[in-house]
Amino acid sequence: KANDNFLMLIPKKNEKQQWEMNDDGLVEIIIPREKLLDRIVRVFIPIPKVMRIHLDPQGSCVWKAMDGKKSIKEIGVVLQERFGENVEPLYERLGTYINILRNNRLITLESVEIDATS
């Protein structure tokens, strides 16, 4: 929603999205290429049935921190603690990365419901 504070949104991984950690502890997002166009192209060009997106240490840290409970602001704190000034400007970079993940349907963003009675 337009009136939500972006930093307070909770990123949640797409439950159908496959991923694994490689031997270096970095995340690899696994994307099957089984759509009709992929299968047609595969007849003419040898392309793999699965695409793997290899995340760098910072991207892997963000992905692993997305537990469905932490807000974007809290994930930023995790990044800051782990990488220090190497992630600056922190929230501009994190916001761009979160939007890329969302635009590619790897995550959704949910707002936190605030209880007005407490």
Image (cartoon, rainbow, N blue to C red):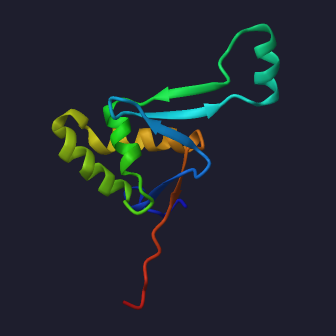
| Residue at screen point 49% across, 43% down | 99
Residue 55, position as x, y percentages in the image: 41, 31
- Displayed quadrant of residue 24: top left
Please state if 92 lies on the left or on the right of 45 as rendered.
Answer: left
* Looking at the image, residue 3 lies above or below residue 17: below
Residue lying at the far bottom of the rendered structure: 117
User: Measured from the top left, where is residue 11 in percent x and y?
Assistant: 46, 54
Q: In which quarter of the image is the N terminus?
A: bottom right
Count of numbered tags: 0
Q: Where is residue 102 in the image (x, y as percent from the top left)?
A: 54, 45
Residue drawn at 62 percent across, 48 percent down: 16
Which quarter of the rendering shows the C terminus?
bottom left
Q: Can you name the residue that lies furthest to the front here?
A: 23
Q: Residue at x 45, y 44 (%)?
A: 98
In the image, residue 18 sits, relative to residue 28, either above or below, namely: below
Q: Is residue 97 above or below residue 65?
A: above
Horizontally, residue 15 falls left or right of residue 70, namely right
Closer-to-camera residue (79/2): 79
Residue 101's place in the image compared with 14, above or below, is: above
Q: From the viewer's side, name the closer residue of 96 and 79.
A: 79
Quarter of the figure with residue 71: bottom left
* Residue 70 locus on image (x, y percent): 37, 60
Q: Is residue 24 left or right of residue 41?
A: left
